[in-house]
Each structure stands twice: as C-alpha cells, then as structure tokens.
Amino acid sequence: MPALTPGTLAELVDGGQAFRWQREPDDTWLGIWAEHVVRLRMNSNGGLEWSAPEALAARVRTALPLYLFGHDTATAVDALPWRSDTHLARCLNAFSGLTILRQPFGETLLGFLCSATKQIVQIKQMIALLAQRHGAPLAGTNSLHRLPTWPELATASEIELRACLLGFRARYIHQTAQFIAANPGWLEATEAAPYAEAKARLMTLPGVGAKVADCVLLFGAGKLEAFPVDTWIIKAMARRYALDEWTPEQVAHFGRMHFGTFAGLAQQYLFAYERAYGKTVSP
DNA sequence: TCCTAACCTCT
DNA sequence: GAGGTTAGG
C-alpha cells in the first residue's frame, strides 16, 4: 500500500469522509466499516501496517485495500489541472497520497444525514450511538458494533433515534428508513445509477440536499465527479479563486468546469488544505 | 429569492 | 453561541 505521512493518514480516515475511525493512545487508528474492524499503524519507513481480529482477518485482507485505495488516484491526480493551477498544485503537494475512500453506500448516506450543521466530532458521536444501540455486535471484538442497516433503522422509532443525539436529523433518518424499507432495491439502484441520476434520486430523500448527495456519491459510490460545496469550500474558492459572493450552486458549477472529471478528488485536497492552513490566512 | 428555524453538544 | 445544511414560509 502507498506511503503516507501520519498527517495525511489522519486526514484520510478522520478528515470528514468517514466517521468511524478513532485514534488510539498508541497512535494507531481503529476503524470500522460494514462488518470490518481494523487497526492501522505507520511503520518507521512510512509504510502502512494493519491488524484485525482473527475471526475477521481474512475478509479484511481483501476489503481494506479496496476501502482505502480502491481508486486509481495517481491517474486521477495527474488528470487534474495542477499544471496551470498553482493553488491546486500546492494542495496536492501538501497532502500527497490523500485519496477518496470507497465506503459502503448505505453507511455513507447515514453519516451525511447526520452531518447538517455539525462538526466531525459531533457527527462521530451520533454515529457511535447509532451503532452501539441499533447495530449488531461484531464477533471477536470487545463490544464493537456495526452500524444498523437501513432495514434495521426502519424498526427504530423516531424517539429512539432522537435519543442518539440526532436532534432534528432524527425525523430525516426515520422517514428515509421508512422510504427505503417500502422500496426494496431503491438504494442499490441509486448506487448503480450514473452520477446525475443518482444525485437526483438521493435529493428526493428528506434531509438530502445537493451537498449531502454529493458527499454520499463521492465517498460512498466512487463518483469522483461529485463536487460537494460546504462552508469550507465556499471559503477556499472565495480566497484562492476570487469567487467572493458566489452562491454554492455557482461554486459547484465552477468546480466541475475547472477541475473536470475528478473534481471531487480536487475538492478533497482543497478542503484538507483550507482546514489545515486557511484558518489564520487573511482573506 | 431570501431568511429563518430545526436540535443539542461542546467550544 | 455557533457548528462541514435543509426545508418551508
């Protein structure tokens, strides 16, 4: 697996793409997706080492490379306009090796339905409670749980969901779970659909606007053309591309035009750079 | 089109 | 007191 710096590894698993990774006291990362549990560590050569509970190790061995490095990032990065865009080149250099995770679709939808007006730590707390209270325990672990599937979520009341600190998001998740339960195959067909159609389908769900839909498709369906526009990207594009006063919709259009087929990958680098270095820079 | 409320925890 | 948004007036 590719060499990463500890900082880029942290950005990859805990930079807002996924919400089920935690840094352990020994500086390893413990992560859960679907029924997989893994511990990641950087060795002294900058290589990535992993371990998993014995009962899960065989499946993790196959699933981990697809989850972390399922995209041909080198090809995608080379296709970005870094030769003519000095800010993009700076971001690519600062987070070399950063990529887009390939997460389970349903879990990604759940995570980003929790994300509205929340910071990463708070989203992780909601997701942890949903797993602990509504997800099945994972064999061979010390009381770790998988996330509930959408059919499982459909059996929870809105009151129970609200108890997981979801606030107004509880209603969105409850209604989405009811819809998915009533429409078998809808989620799978949405994941398989082309980008524009998949986005339109997702946006019919309560609590899913353009930004959430783009995050779900980028991080949970491998659609690298999706270009989510959140407050960080609004700030980054205003500062670095002089797009002050542009609406999110206009910024999204610019992003797709300027960065092209792999706009979502560019977005992740811009996002990481702005979070790391943009806080104290004058506008 | 624009503005506000929706919830609840942590800063 | 506002936080990586959405829906409805």
Image (cartoon, coloured by chain):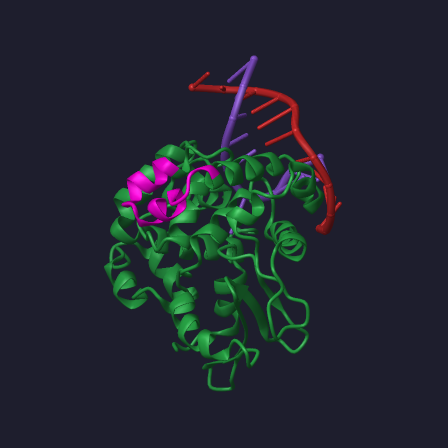
Chain colours: A green, B red, C purple
Q: How many marks?
A: 0
Residue A158 included in the magenta stretch of the image: no
**Region rendered in magenta:** A182-201
Q: Nearer the viewer, residue A278 or C4?
A: C4
Q: Nearer the viewer, residue A166 or A89?
A: A166
* Point 54% across, 61% down: residue: A14
* Point 42% across, 61% down: residue: A101
Asked if residue A97 shows in the view, the reply is no
- Main SS, magenta residues: helix
Q: Position of residue A163 (x, y in %)?
A: 71, 43
Residue at the extreme bottom of the image, as rendered: A44
Residue A191 included in the magenta stretch of the image: yes
Q: Position of residue A243 (x, y in %)?
A: 38, 38
Please, is residue A194 above or below residue A57 in the view? above
Please, is residue A211 above or below residue A12 in the view? above
* Point 53% across, 43% down: residue: A113
* Point 38% across, 45% down: residue: A185
Q: Quadrant of the N terminus of chain A?
A: bottom left
> Which quadrant of the view contains residue A202?
top left
- Could you tell whether A171 is left or right of A203 in the image? right
Please, is residue A266 above or below residue A238 in the view? below
Q: Position of residue A37 (x, y in %)?
A: 55, 70
Q: Position of residue A146 (x, y in %)?
A: 57, 61
Q: Nearer the viewer, residue B2 or A14?
A: A14
Asked if residue A258 shows in the view, the reply is yes
